[in-house]
Structure formats: C-alpha cells, structure tokens
Image (tube, rainbow, N blue to C red):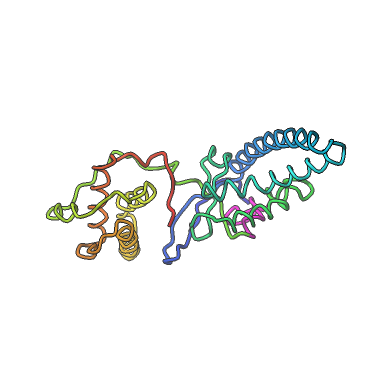
C-alpha cells in the first residue's frame, strides 16, 4: 500500500503506452483541502446572499432559510467540481495549485460526463461515514491511486506535465534542403498545447523504441497537418514535417511561450 506518487502507463486510442506520474495521497489531500476551503467560502457567500434575497422577496422565515441552505449546499458540492473540471480540463483551483489534473484512462481531457460521475462518486468518497476515509483508502490501495469517483468515471489524477515542461531554450531549424518547404507551413493555427506535445516528442524521441517513435511521429504529423491545413505534409518524413512546423512556430512566437500554459487536448 503506497501513499506516494507512482508512474503508470496510459494507453492512448492509438495503442501507444505513455508513462505518466499519478498524483499521490498527500498531494490529493492538500488539493482537496484547498478546494474545500474555497467551497466553504462560496457556500457562505451564497447562503448569505440567498437568504437576504429570499427574505426581502417572500418575507423570510426558518423554512426559507433552510431551503436556501439546502439549495446552496447542493449547488456548491456538485457544481464546483463539475464546473471547474469541465471548463478547465480536469483542474479545480486546488488541483491547479498542486500541479494536478484529472484525465481519462486513455489520457484525454475529461468532459462533462466524467466530471459529473466523479462528483457523484465524491459523495461516497467524502461524506460516507467516517467522512473522507473511504476516498483516502481507495486512493492508497488502488494501483492507479483512484478514489471511488475515479473508478466510476474511468479517470485518474496525474501530475500535470505542463508543470514539468522541459527547458524552453531549444531552437528548431528546418532540416537542410527543406527551408523552402518549411515556408509553406502557416503556423498561425498551432496551439500552445500542440507545440508543447510535439516539442516534447522531438526532444525525447531517441528514448522511444523505433516502432513507437514512428507511430507517434506519423500520428502527430497527421494531426498537425489537419490543424494547419497543409495538403502535402506526406512529401517529407513525419519528423521532418514536425521540425519544420516547430521552426515556423518559434520564429513567429518564440521558443518559450508554452512553458506555463496548458496540456494536450488530443
């Protein structure tokens, strides 16, 4: 039974195994504490404003106050994680502060469905007596540090790779003889997320097996070609196309624009 962060394999839809670091018990507890404090603050403000508004509208009373408290509590308990995890791609304020993110088991960003299922499972994790123990136990005994909500939704909590971005000093240049080809690539549509992922692949490709490296290169090149709408990307090797595109992107935006921003949306 481990309380530390562990490395686990994510199998992408292309059957490529990516090694990532799952969030450990301590970091998830701290993130949960931060989120709980913020939720309490929101709840207090909501109840205060709601009670004042309801009292001035319908005369107030104990039943009105009880209704306001119940509605506000339900909205915050469910709405807070669902809203943040859906709109911020798996990151609540607490998770952001600790460098954590929720993703699906294949590494994709979670959507409204997964966020809702996690929130429903959170009732068991946080409120089933003795409060909070159930979620803590599941995080420590499951291989991928999943609580009940994660098991229901098919998600895991990982350390956000964007927090551990490599040094932005590397500068790409088009391979010899492909300078003219590189000029045909318009990098305007390339997102910071795409740049981060492709840059990571190009700098770490030597550590991959030839088969996986080729498969990833082909997949990334095809995705990027669709983004920049380049009709002739297959005229060069996939990695050469990626290098040309990165060179064009850097000359437009600089080599370090990605370091503090988001993660892959694939």
Question: What percent of the width, then of the height, locates residue 157?
Answer: 56, 50
Question: What percent of the width, then of the height, locates residue 135?
Answer: 68, 50
Q: Nearer the viewer, residue 37 or 226?
A: 226
Question: What percent of the width, then of the height, locates residue 137?
Answer: 69, 50
User: What is the quadrant of the C terminus in the image?
Assistant: bottom left
Magenta span: chief secondary structure = helix
| Left or right of 220 in this view: 96 | right
Q: Nearer the viewer, residue 179 or 150?
A: 179
- Does residue 47 belong to the magenta stretch? no
Which stretch appears magenta?
A: 138-152
Furthest-front residue in view?
57
Q: Is residue 4 above or below residue 44?
A: below
Measuring 34% from the left and 49% from the top, which residue is drawn there? Answer: 195
Question: What percent of the width, then of the height, locates residue 223?
Answer: 34, 60
Furthest-right residue in view?
62
Q: Nearer the viewer, residue 195 or 128?
A: 195
| Left or right of 201 in this view: 131 | right
């Amino acid at each position: 039974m481990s309380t530390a962060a562990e490395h686990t394999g994510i199998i992408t839809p292309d059957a490529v195994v990516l090694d990532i670091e799952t969030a450990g018990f301590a970091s998830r507890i701290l993130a949960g504490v931060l989120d709980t404090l913020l939720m309490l603050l929101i709840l207090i403000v909501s109840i205060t404003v709601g009670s004042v508004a309801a009292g001035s509208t319908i005369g107030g009373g104990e039943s009105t106050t009880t209704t306001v408290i119940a509605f506000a509590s339900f909205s915050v308990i469910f709405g807070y994680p669902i809203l943040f995890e859906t709109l911020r791609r798996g990151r609540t304020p607490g998770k952001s502060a600790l460098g954590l993110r929720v993703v699906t088991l294949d590494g994709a960003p979670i959507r409204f469905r997964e966020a809702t299922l996690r929130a429903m499972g959170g009732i068991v994790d946080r409120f089933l007596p003795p409060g909070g123990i159930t979620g803590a136990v599941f995080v420590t005994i499951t291989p991928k540090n999943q609580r009940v909500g994660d098991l229901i939704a098919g998600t895991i909590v990982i350390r956000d790779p964007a927090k551990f971005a490599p040094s932005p000093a590397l500068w790409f240049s088009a391979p010899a003889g492909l300078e003219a080809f590189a000029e045909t690539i318009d990098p305007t549509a390339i997102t910071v997320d795409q740049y981060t992922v492709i840059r990571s692949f190009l700098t770490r490709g030597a550590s991959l097996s030839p088969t996986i490296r080729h498969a990833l290169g082909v997949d990334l090149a095809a995705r990027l070609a669709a983004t920049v709408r380049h009709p002739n990307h297959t005229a060069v090797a996939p990695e050469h196309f990626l290098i040309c595109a990165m060179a064009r992107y850097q000359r437009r935006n600089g080599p370090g624009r990605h370091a503090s921003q988001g993660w892959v949306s694939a």
